[in-house]
Image (cartoon, rainbow, N blue to C red):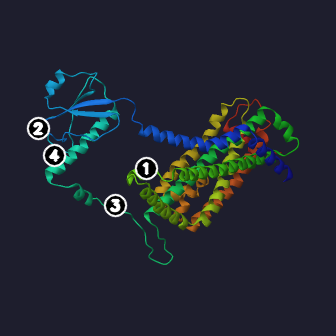
Amino acid sequence: MQKLWLIVQREYLSRVKKRTFILATILTPLGAGLLIFISAYLTSYQGDISHRFVVVDEGHFLGDSLAKSDGYSFSFSQKTLQEEMDGYNADEHSGIVYLPKNLDWNRPDIDVPIYTDEKLTFDVRSTIGNMVEERIRDYKMMQMGIEEKELAALETAVSIDTKAVREKGVEESGLGAGITAMLGGLMGFVMYLTLFIYGMMVMRSVMEEKTSRIVEVMISSVKPFELMMGKILGVAAVGLTQLFIWIVLTFGIIGFASAFFGYDPAVAQQFGTDPGIATATQQVNAHAILAEIGKINWWMILPLFAFYFVGGYILYASMFAAVGSAIGDDTGEGQSLTLPISIPIILAIYIMFHAVRQPDSSLSIFASIFPLFSPIVMPARLGFNPPAWQIILSALILLGSVLAFVWLAGRIYRVGILMYGQKLTFRTMLKWIFVKG
């Protein structure tokens, strides 16, 4: 155990002291926040091109007005379409929007031609189409004698809340169901990233020491199995450290942004320009969300998530370590050898999305018990209170599979780590398992 601890300590300290680790750990949350900000900005950015259109509305369906939009301007003409086309100047106008007098506004779909010499982009077509749709909708309402408030009264938002039939039943609001689904998806996605990122980190660490021949010196002092487990546990400690720092920084950034801005501009836009209304609305939503989060059975979810986190990581990291020990100077071999390990992880993340929507389906139950899928799928189901027998069976199978995979990986590792110049196949690696010594 002393030698194992020394290997874990060496693997951990050699990584967390690197400048790249420190920069990546600090800059990743900041980069993610910046990416979200840039994405939101680009989504709302209208460009710097001004589109000027002439509208020939022979039937006055649009009421001589269209909604305002950045980068778009419309002038309504009393001339005929032919007169506008004869005097059309591409330098002054982008095109002519034409609504004929005999336009059948009762149809569910209407074609509105735009006369232009330019090639209109999809965004321009969509923007003008939405503006015309809105005005024709108002025209239809006026013709039918329908007021806006009467039409709004027809729309009803329905939220499904569950009420317990018996005392032990579970009551949950629609907001709580949404939070549960988001929590399940988040935990499954964290597991997915962990298995890929830190599993590959273990493999690269093994490959580097093998190709540099450092491992030959280390093997003289420690057993191959101790060396492999030391690397797995050392990288796991690095991952947990990085994950903890990311969580702290993320909540710190969110808290700082909330304190600095005071309220969410998106909420203010929905409820007017009064910051007091927007802030009060956010407080109501925040209280409701916190109340639903408090109803979640964290005493069950957090320990089980930690169990699946550690179990899933050790299971896959042992396989990545075995592959890393078998790869020599030709790193291209790693792509073919890691493919069978990557496929179950990729399949599990797709099944996880299904499990969030239908946690009690046969596929979700099977995947949450099958050891190659359960580290990702079962955490996604925990918020939906699966039966205790499924959790116990899944945990026992995962624990047994971890022990089996670690033993098999250790058998491959002890031979492969000192093997050079041999073309590797899965058949060769299977033979290494049964080599005595």
Nearest to the observer: residue 69 or residue 293? 69
Q: Are marks 2 and 1 in contact (CB under 8 Å)?
A: no
* Three-letter code for the amino acid on which mark 2 is drawn: Asn
Q: Residues within 10 Å of mark 3 (few under 14, many from 20)?
A: few
* Three-letter code for the amino acid on which mark 3 is drawn: Ala
Instruction: From the viewer's perspective, tell me whether residue 209 is left or right of residue 277.
Output: right
The residue that label 4 is drawn on is: 106
Ranked by sequence position, the earlier of labels 3 and 2 is 2
- Circle 1: element type: helix
Classify 298 as above or below 267.
Answer: below
Q: Which mark is residue 266?
A: 1
* Three-letter code for the amino acid on which mark 4 is drawn: Asn
Instruction: From the viewer's perspective, tell me whether residue 121 is left or right of residue 264.
Output: left
Residue 397 seen in this snapshot:
yes
Residue at point 55%, 53% (across, down): 259
Quarter of the image containing the N terminus? bottom right
Ranked by sequence position, the earlier of labels 4 and 3 is 4
Q: Which mark is residue 102?
A: 2
* Residue 387 falls in image quadrant: bottom right
Residue at point 48%, 61% (across, down): 283
Name of the residue lying farthest toward the bottom: 167
**Which is closer to the viewer, label 1 or label 4?**
1
Nearest to the observer: residue 154 or residue 394? 154
Q: Residues within 10 Å of mark 1 (few under 14, many from 20)?
A: few
Question: What's the distance in space between the residues labelled 3 and 2, CA to CA?
Answer: 38 Å
Ranked by sequence position, the earlier of labels 1 and 3 is 3
